[in-house]
Image: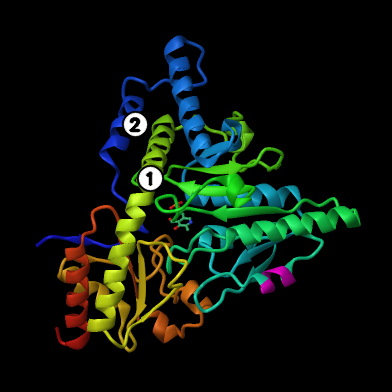
């Protein structure tokens, strides 16, 4: 039985080109890039090239790229980095951020901005939360559970306006915009100036690169407190001998993702429409969660009223379909998804919801088979 993998939002297989690019740093080129001898300096040069590649893709400078061990670390560095520096200030996040944003934010003066029914940020309510004491706004670029893409440019414009008002009032507190872009690098523009952001999180595990790899983009002039103290690596923000293999792997994966972006987006958008059409036909009581318009092309999140998603996942797996109930990024917990709650689903409906996320190997036949199998499971409780 062919396995149909529909959990690309949780993990992607490594691209063979990424593995190939990483290989030398796991064997011959093992040297510590801080060492003085020539072979080590060659490794340092390769690391600098990886940093420059990432910077170029983001429209940034190499010095603005901090390599991290994944998205969780980059989010923690962004939030603790700013909030420890301005310790009495306030942070605002959306209510549907990943836990690696919500948990560190909760340690400070933190307000959550609600989202609308389609998961898009309620900009008016966000604006009302802003005070003279707000130093950081963190809004994800797109949500990992329901795929809704947030109006980041509009939030950036709001920040520009706040800065102007503060200047007039003589309020010297800066205000920054952080975005967690972990789910977006395969599909969306990452140019930091076009987006108008100050800090951006990316990770390799979602873009056919290595897990525990990623970056935090930090706009020049934004000052952060370090997350990990030690030998002063990564501009002193997170010390530790660089993981050159992971960093080169991440840079390679990001480059490939952005090269394939336009075509893969078109291909998956068509499959997504197939998915929605087949769901409407074979599972007419189902409803789709998230935005129809501003949505990642690989995400399908649906509620099947009266169903239990745990049972559905077990039955789907028996039929060769690997899917998810919500975010697999947090270790399994029984609580209903905070994202589905925030868009107004009852606990019961949240627990009747599935997330199916497509990727490079997903075909039209996979989509058809998944919906047919799901309909069989739903319509035949003893199946
Ligand atoms: C939106 C989002 N942010 C952050 C993370 C955490 O990234 P990592 O697993 O690389 O630490 C994930 C998923 O894992 C994610 O989907």
Magenta segment includes 280? no
In this picture, is 133 found above or below 257?
A: below
Read off the residue under disc 2.
22
Q: Nearer the viewer, mark 1 or mark 2?
A: 1
Q: Which of marks 2 and 1 precedes in the sequence?
A: 2
Residue occupying the far left of the picture: 1
Residue marked by disc 1? 257
- Quadrant hosting ligand 1: bottom left
Residue shown at the point (28%, 76%) measured from the top left: 277
Query: Residue shown at 64%/48% (left/top)?
Result: 198
Q: Is residue 32 visible?
A: no
The one nearer the camera, 51 or 315, is 51
368, 344: nearer the viewer: 368
Q: Identify whether 182 is placed above or below 238.
A: below
Task: Tell me, yes or no, if residue 68 can be seen here.
Answer: yes
37 displayed left or right of 352: right
Report x, y in % for residue 112.
64, 69
SS category of the residue bearing label 1: helix
Q: What's the magenta region?
A: 124-128
Q: CA distance from mark 1 to mark 2?
A: 16 Å
Q: Which residue is at a point 71% across and 57% down the rendered structure image? A: 159
Q: Quadrant of the image for the N terminus?
A: bottom left
Residue displayed at 38% across by 49% down: 261
Circle count: 2
How many neighbours does mark 2 have within 10 angstroms: few (below 14), some (14-19), or many (20 or more)?
many
């Amino acid at each position: 039985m062919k396995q149909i993998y529909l959990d690309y939002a949780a993990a992607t297989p490594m691209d063979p080109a990424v593995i190939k690019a990483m290989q030398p740093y796991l064997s011959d080129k093992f040297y510590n890039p801080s060492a003085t001898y020539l072979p080590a300096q060659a490794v340092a040069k390769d690391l600098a090239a990886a940093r420059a590649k990432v910077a170029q893709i983001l429209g940034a400078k190499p010095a603005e790229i901090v390599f991290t061990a994944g998205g969780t670390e980059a989010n923690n560095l962004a939030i603790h980095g700013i909030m420890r520096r301005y310790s009495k200030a306030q942070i605002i996040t959306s209510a549907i951020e990943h836990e690696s944003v919500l948990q560190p934010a909760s340690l400070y003066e933190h307000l959550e901005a609600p989202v609308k029914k389609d998961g898009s940020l309620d900009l008016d309510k966000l604006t009302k939360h802003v005070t003279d004491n707000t130093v950081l706004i963190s809004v994800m670029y797109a949500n990992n559970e329901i795929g809704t893409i947030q109006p980041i440019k509009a939030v950036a414009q709001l920040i520009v306006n706040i800065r102007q008002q503060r200047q007039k009032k003589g309020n010297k507190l800066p205000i920054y915009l952080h975005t967690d872009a972990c789910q977006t690098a395969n599909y969306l523009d990452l140019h930091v100036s076009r987006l108008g952001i100050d800090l951006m999180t990316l990770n390799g595990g979602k873009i056919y690169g290595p897990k525990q790899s990623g970056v935090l983009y930090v706009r020049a002039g934004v000052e952060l407190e370090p997350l990990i103290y030690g030998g002063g690596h990564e501009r002193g923000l997170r010390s530790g001998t660089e993981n050159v293999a992971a960093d080169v792997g991440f840079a390679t994966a990001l480059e490939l993702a952005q090269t394939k972006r336009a075509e893969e987006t078109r291909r998956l958008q068509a499959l997504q429409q197939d998915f929605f059409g087949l769901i409407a036909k074979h599972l007419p009581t189902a409803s789709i969660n998230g935005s129809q318009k501003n949505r990642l092309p690989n995400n399908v999140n649906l509620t099947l009223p009266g169903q239990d998603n745990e049972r559905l996942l077990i039955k789907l797996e028996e039929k060769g379909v690997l899917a998810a109930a919500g975010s697999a990024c947090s270790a399994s917990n029984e609580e209903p998804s905070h994202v589905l709650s925030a868009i107004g689903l009852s606990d019961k409906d949240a627990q009747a919801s599935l997330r199916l996320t497509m990727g490079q190997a997903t075909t039209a036949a996979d989509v058809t088979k998944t919906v047919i199998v799901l309909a069989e499971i739903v319509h035949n409780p003893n199946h």
